[in-house]
Amino acid sequence: MSGNGAVWGRVRGRLRAFPERLAVCRAEAAAYGRCVQASTAPGGRLTKDLCAQEFEALRNCFAFAAKKTPRGGL
């Protein structure tokens, strides 16, 4: 299946470019990390949806970054 190699080449190219795209999500990742860390610190309690707002902001940033990743590789 020669077409399979082309698919994996595109996937590898997108995966290589993705960390650079995600670098724009530093603030969202830090905010989510702080929320989770505060919730799991001694005396804290992580519950469902406690960090939902921060997670949603991070997820939206990741989705936006993924859309900007070129489809044809590097």
Image: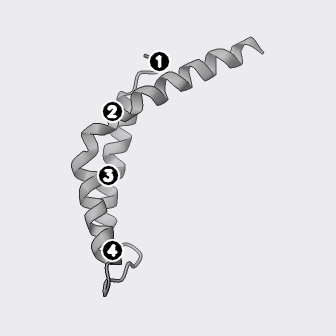
Residue at (47, 26) in percent of width and height: 14
> Which amino acid type corresponds to the residue marked 4 in the rendered image?
Leu
Of mark 1 and mark 3, the one earlier in the sequence is: 3
> x and y percent of residue 34 in the render?
26, 65
- Quarter of the image for the C terminus: give it: top left
> Which amino acid type corresponds to the residue marked 2 in the rendered image?
Arg
Whether residue 13 is situated above or below residue 44 in the rendered picture: above
CB atoms of marks 1 and 2 within 8 Å: no
> x and y percent of residue 10 in the render?
54, 20
Q: Which mark is residue 21?
A: 2
Of mark 3 and mark 2, the one earlier in the sequence is: 2
> Which amino acid type corresponds to the residue marked 1 in the rendered image?
Gly
Q: Which residue is mark 3?
A: 58
- SS assignment at label 1: loop
Classed neighbour count for the residue bearing mark 1: other residues with Cα under 10 Å, few (<14), some (14–19), many (≥20): some
- SS assignment at label 3: helix
Residue 60 horizontal side relative to residue 8, left or right: left
